[in-house]
Image (tube, helix red, strand yellow):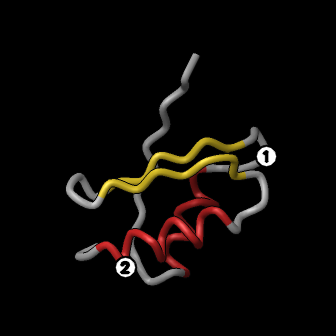
Amino acid sequence: MTCKNCVRHVESALRKRPGVAQVAVDLERGLAVVEHGDEVTASALCEVVADAGYQGVPSLVDPT
């Protein structure tokens, strides 16, 4: 990602994915934080990011 438009593009793609509750993309850090239901996998989210034209690498963080 190189600009704010990239951020909007990634956020929009992730928000369209069923089961995604909330998305926050940080351009400077080059990462997206996605809150989602148990039915959504990190691999599926990376696929959404790839389909949008970007590279995603899963990094799981359990909020509990």
Structural distance between the alpha carbons of marks 1 and 2: 29 Å
Q: Residue at x 64, y 62 (%)?
A: 15
Instruction: Give the SS element for disc 2.
Output: helix
Residue 5 placement: quadrant: bottom left
How many numbered marks does the figure carry? 2
Point 45% across, 72% down: residue: 8
Where is residue 63 shown, x and y percent of the image? 55, 23
Q: The N terminus lies in which quarter of the figure? A: bottom left
Q: Residue under label 2, please give it.
A: 5
The image shows residue 33, relative to residue 30, as above or below, that is above
Expressed as whole percent of the image width and height from the top left, the position of residue 6 reads: 37, 76
Q: Which type of secondary structure does the marked residue at label 1 adopt? A: loop
Instruction: Looking at the picture, tell me which residue is in the foreground, 47 or 9.
Output: 9
Of labels 1 and 2, earlier in sequence is 2
Side (left or right) of 17 relative to 33: right
Three-letter code for the amino acid on which mark 1 is drawn: Glu
| Above-or-below relation of 47 to 57 | below
Can you identify the residue that label 1 sits on? 39
Q: Nearer the viewer, residue 47 or 31?
A: 31
Residue at 44% in and 83% down: 53
> Looking at the image, which residue is at 46% across and 51% down?
24
Quadrant housing the C terminus: top right
Report x, y in % for residue 39: 79, 46
x then y, percent, for residue 29: 23, 52
